[in-house]
Image: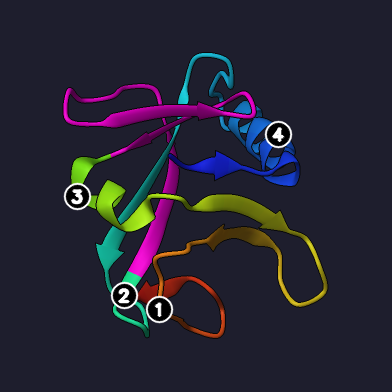
């Protein structure tokens, strides 16, 4: 399961609405792809369709879909949002990551 913090929920709803998505029916698609300075990087986008291979979760009122391959890397992850001086954006608190890069956008196991 993937959890969503209160701060991330507020930002997801704001951004989904701005992009023409409905936060009550559409999804946040979270995935993992090769790349980044640590080997794997996170991918986050909005989507209004899901495939039969997607895992579907809902936490804190946010619907999340993850493909099967990415799910293995993301089990137990919490999606946070940081708006501090050191950078603004979504942050993944992933207990499976053994190493992350300085910006937090990539990781390795």
Quadrant of the image occupied by residue 87 = bottom right
Query: Residues at badges 2 and 1 in contact (C-beta under 8 Å)?
Result: yes
Cα distance in 3D space between marks 1 and 4 = 32 Å
Left or right: 34 as drawn, with respect to 79: left
- In magenta, the rendered stretch is 41-66
Dot 2 alpha-carbon crowd within 10 angstroms: few under 14, some 14 to 19, many 20 or more:
few
**Closer to the camera: disc 3 or disc 4?**
3
**Residue at numbered disc 3:** 69
Cα distance in 3D space between marks 3 and 4 = 28 Å
Quadrant showing the C terminus: bottom left
Secondary-structure class at tag 3:
helix
Quadrant of the image occupied by residue 7 = top right
Q: Which of the pair 107/43 is nearer the observer?
A: 107
Question: Residue at the spot x=55%, y=61% of the render?
Answer: 93
Q: Which of the pair 50/3 is nearer the observer?
A: 3
Q: Position of residue 44 (x, y in %)?
A: 44, 49
**Residue at numbered disc 1:** 98
Q: Position of residue 82 (x, y in %)?
A: 73, 60
Q: Earlier in the sequence, mark 3 or mark 1?
A: 3
**Residue at numbered disc 4:** 14
Secondary-structure class at tag 2:
loop
Dot 1 alpha-carbon crowd within 10 angstroms: few under 14, some 14 to 19, many 20 or more:
few
Q: Earlier in the sequence, mark 2 or mark 3?
A: 3
Q: Earlier in the sequence, mark 1 or mark 4?
A: 4
Q: Earlier in the sequence, mark 2 or mark 4?
A: 4
């Amino acid at each position: 399961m993937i959890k969503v913090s209160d701060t991330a929920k507020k930002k997801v709803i704001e951004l989904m609405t701005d992009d023409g998505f409905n936060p009550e029916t559409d999804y946040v698609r979270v995935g993992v792809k090769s790349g980044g300075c640590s080997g794997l990087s996170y991918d986050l986008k909005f989507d209004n369709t899901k495939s039969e291979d997607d895992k579907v979760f809902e936490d804190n009122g946010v619907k999340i879909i993850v493909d099967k391959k990415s799910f293995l890397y993301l089990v137990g992850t919490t999606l946070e949002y940081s708006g501090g001086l050191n950078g603004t954006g979504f942050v993944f608190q992933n207990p499976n990551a053994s190493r992350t890069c300085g910006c937090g956008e990539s990781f390795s196991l």
